[in-house]
Image (cartoon, rainbow, N blue to C red):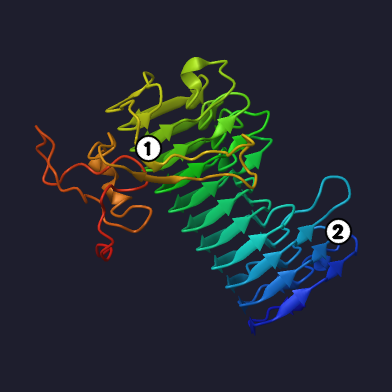
Amino acid sequence: MLLIGASPQISNCILRDNVVEEAYWNWRSQGAGIHVEAGSPLIQDCSFIDNRANSHGGGIYCIDSADLRVIGCTFLRSEATFPGDGGSGGGIHAANSTVWIESCHFEGCHFDSIFLTDSTCGVSQCSFRQSDGVVGFRSNLDVEQSTLERTDGIGLVYSTATMRECLFLAGGSSYGGAGFYNASSSIVAWNCLFVGNVGWYADGGAIVCDRYDDEDVCTLDLINCTLVGNDATDRGGAIAVLNGAEVNVFNCVLWGNTDNGEVPWGRQVFFEAPSAVQLVHCNIDGGWAWGGYGNIDADPLFLIPPDPGPDGWWGSWDDNLGDLRLGDGSSCFNAGLNDAFTFCPIDLEHRQRFAGGIMPRGWSGKLPPIDIGAFEYGADPAACPPE
């Protein structure tokens, strides 16, 4: 389907077994399901199944300032192929465009479920399962309330992003950062969960921050997140900070993450000079002595700790992702920094912070400290506070 300067609403359609075999340099051959140029189409409640483009956009391809909305759609086994090194955007490819993707499911998509170049994209309440993940190049990405399970995560190059209330579960990447890979980008993430992600033959099981060039900016602010059971076959089971990147971690739990043990202090967070890393009011397994304050090293007492199962491998059928809410007596209770409240007035389950309501001895603030991690202990599932 070819849309040029058109703004139709396309609903309740099934696009199946479409293949574009034309030469990759013919840009109108991109988009095996739907090709969009300009316009503002709405694609709603559609299924894209077993579609393949020779280069870009197995399901949907949009270009030239297209304002595209994709809501309630399913992308199954969509691929973007290219002889030699692969295409991009097995599900959706956006170039120089604005895209809103809501309540969509991506499964079995290859060469990226979503690929962005010079684009702005919002992703809300979407799920990605056993698929390649999301890639942004010189783009602006906002992801909320979405789950990436058994994917290779989110990769950002020269981009900016916010991520909130997202789950990164049992992913795997040969580049590291199976949650997300920050390459000379700026990211703020809060109320996110990273469990059982593996960096194969790489640094950083869950997160990698890597500044490509001395003049680049590469920053990460990680706020009220929980990172547990991630593994890097090299260094930094949870986070690896490389080549001068700057990382600030506030109110986070980093527990039970593993690496090759080459650098004993870097099992949870590894960094190399001239990188700058600061941990503030975090619970970090093994402790932390390299910048920051208010940190603790104590069992967070999760309700059910995660476990890779009898086979010992994350990403397989027997994974137990656990229940990472805080149990009675957790040291994370009332141990956070309230400056993060601006980002986190609610927790991952949309429960209001300050649930405990107990003032620690010697505390002079008007409100008790919020908890460390993505979940607030004993939180009331009442309506969220007004914005």
For the point 66% across and 39% down, the residue is 173
Residue 368 vertical position relative to residue 269 in the rendered view, above or below = below
Left or right: residue 213 compared with residue 14: left
Residue 22 vertical position relative to residue 269 in the rendered view, above or below = below
Residue 277 vertical position relative to residue 43 in the rendered view, above or below = above
> Going by the picture, which residue comes out furthest to the front?
310
- The N terminus appears in which quarter of the rendering? bottom right
Instruction: For the residues labelled 1 and 2, say whether their Cβ atoms are less than 8 Å apart.
Output: no
For the point 68% across and 28% down, the residue is 201
Residue that badge 1 annotates: 252
The answer for how far apart the CA atoms under marks 1 and 2 are is 46 Å
Provide residue 163's location: percent of width, then percent of height. 47, 51
**In the foreground, 356 or 52:** 356
> Residue 56 falls in which quadrant of the image?
bottom right
Type of residue at label 1? Cys
**In the foreground, 64 or 62:** 62
Provide residue 210's location: percent of width, then percent of height. 57, 32
For the point 53% across and 35% down, the residue is 230
Q: Residues within 10 Å of mark 1 (few under 14, many from 20)?
A: many
Left or right: residue 95 compared with residue 220: right
Disc 2 is placed on an element classified as: loop
On the question of residue 63 being in view, the answer is: no
